[in-house]
Image (cartoon, coloured by chain):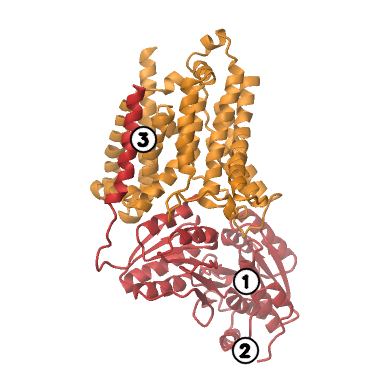
Chain colours: A orange, B red
Amino acid sequence: MSALLRGRAFRDVAVVIVVVFGFGSIAMLLAHVSPLDGFGALFDGAFGTRSELAETLVQTTSLLFPALGVAIAARAGLFNIGADGQLILGGFAAGWIGAQFPLPGYLAIPMVLLAGTFAGGAWGAIAGFLRARFGANEVIATLMLNYVAVLLATYLVNGPLQQGGAGASETAGLPKAAQLPDLIADSRLTWAFVIALVVAFVLRWVLQRTVFGYELRAAGDAPEAAKRAGIDLGRTAFVAMTLSGALAGLGGATIVSGVLHRFNTGLSPGYGFIAIAVALVGNLDPLWIVVASFAFGVLQSGGVAMQAEALVPRDVVTLVTGLAIIALAGRRVVASLRST
Amino acid sequence: MSRRRVAALALALVWFAAVPAGCARQRAAGGAVRIGMVTDTGGLGDRSFNDSAYAGLMRAQRELHVDTVALQSRSAADYQVNLTVLANKEYDEIFAIGFLMARDVAEVSERYPTRHFSIIDAVVDEPNVTSVTFKEEQGSFLAGALAAMTTKTKTIAFLGGIDIPLLRKFEAGYAAGARQVDPSVKVISKYIGSFDDVASGKELAGVQFDQGADIIYVAAGKGGLGAIDQVKSRPNAYLIGVDADQDGIVPGKILTSMVKRVDVGVFRVCQQAAAHKPRPVHLTLGLKEGGVGLTDFRYTRSVVTPPKIAALAKLRAAIIAGKIVVPSTREELASFKPVPL
């Protein structure tokens, strides 16, 4: 599984670039916009000014956490489609606890981030447990748990754990002490970006340099051999899914603590799903995923600017993203068919 | 291999970090004033709130020659993203349509102190935000008065979306208007608990009709469509619509609509922005400013007779002159007494 998902990074990047620019141009021509204007507006909107670059990095950060989560599960041979639900529950735990228990600054931020990490991890652990104990397919389990997560958070925030909103499905606002400090003034970019980078580097070190990382990769690349070598596949699956969910949950917590300063049930426009594409384009390697997150961050923030400035519907970006994923996945399927 | 990858990654990051330094963009001199708008998740085409705001924006484009753009929000996560993109793009005025965006406007306006924002239907206490609100209670007062003049069963009803202060303004004004005309008329109130639950809207409207009400004033967003479905099967019963002119949806069954002129609010702020004048901190639009009012009864003239129209005009004048102070909360409603005219 893991071997199937990984490919040659440079060739993948080339495929993505061709698809994005080629099909993007066609889509823009169909919308009666010059591709030069369209892409100009996209890149200008993504890093034309300091604050626009900051906004791109905000999107990068929001994608990076769940993408790292998807990657670690995939390296263990597991497909985590549930990053979005894990991210939402992580955000909910962070928002609720942050607003409910005001603590001084040096405790408040770690508590909020840990709350999100634990909630996301617990949600990932459910699928990991089902897989380890009963051999349940984690694709189905994580996919379904997305819906449960959204509905659970919506119910809690409107029902038993309501904190007095004004008609919106939200928690109360986080106190200043629980808000991640800004990295660039007058922008939405916070230290969450730095945390994400550190997590990516640590994750790479864990995967490449520790026994646990080795066992995890062995379980993903050659499960039969790993089993014979004495690696407990069930335990590896459980831990990988828990970690995967924890990373997505931490991402949700950083959105709440850094960007929105409250939990809202609509806080994710599908970060957990785009993250799957990000992880694949990044070849499941934490460092390449940083680069891939940035590329998708450019599309996300530049896409909105493109709609504002060049009047290209933002859906062009969604379309192009989807085509890039199909191209990547398709190439790998063809390659794997050829090799068998 | 791995070392080369790290080097490539480092290079990429350095390049991206270096880019913004050279790209501080200048504003085109003498360019047109640029006005942006962010819809809520209802979006354009809702035939109500967002469409009305957009109409105001389009009028500004025609009459004031400003550049405009409207960004639609697909989820609540889009609110801040859209507002931020417009702030980054140096729009002179940025509209947030709807109270759901109140906290997002507060966040973004704090981070962009040199930009100016306007929010509809909510009060955001920031120096660079104009809060545009409406005196819904005044228009609702006229709706309640008309309902009390028209009811045969001496019972009228109010059906709201979510029980929040904004909706209680509708409820209080409506009940006060009825009391002004005929204190013996009974007003029953219910809230659906959401703004998009069509099925519950239909069911609760049915309950209110069964309790003897023959006119329901519906302020429940999309949930109101359920009530409209219900009234079709009820002879001698009417609805009063809200926000947009809904009279034509079922001609003859919708007595009138309490129209909220979001377009007027948007246009008024645009006028200030186009003239580079400071925007008001708080723009409140009532009957006097043409911000709220009833429609022209074009499908219901057989019920809304000329004497009733004359009585409504008299009440309207009394509110504008300040002779009637319309209650906007339940507490104020409790102490409201009919004013002799």
Do the residues indicated by labels 2 and 1 lie within the same chain of the protein?
yes
Front residue of B238/B121: it is: B121
Question: In the rendering, which numbered label is found on residue A55?
Answer: none
Residue at image position (65%, 69%) is B168
Q: Mark 3: which secondary structure?
A: helix
On the image, numbered disc 1 is attached to which residue?
Answer: B170
Binning the other alpha carbons within 10 Å of mark 3 as few (below 14), some (14 to 19) or many (20 upward) gives some
Residue B154: % across, % down: 73, 76
Binning the other alpha carbons within 10 Å of mark 2 as few (below 14), some (14 to 19) or many (20 upward) gives few
Circles 2 and 1: CB atoms closer than 8 Å = no
Front residue of A75/A140: it is: A75
Q: Say left or right for B164 vs B154.
A: left
Do the residues indicated by labels 3 and 2 lie within the same chain of the protein?
no
Residue at image position (75%, 66%) is B211
Circles 3 and 1: CB atoms closer than 8 Å = no
Residue A180: % across, % down: 53, 48
Q: Say left or right for B116 vs B338.
A: left
State which quadrant residue B157 falls in: bottom right
Q: CA distance from mark 2 to mark 1?
A: 20 Å
Residue B244 vertical placement versus A224 (above, below): below
Residue B222: % across, % down: 56, 59
Quarter of the picture containing the C terminus of chain B is bottom right
Do the residues indicated by labels 3 and 1 lie within the same chain of the protein?
no
Amino acid at the residue labelled 3: Leu
Residue B279: % across, % down: 43, 74
Binning the other alpha carbons within 10 Å of mark 1 as few (below 14), some (14 to 19) or many (20 upward) gives many
On the image, numbered disc 3 is attached to which residue?
Answer: A323
Looking at the image, the residue that sits furthest to the top is: A228
On the image, numbered disc 2 is attached to which residue?
Answer: B323
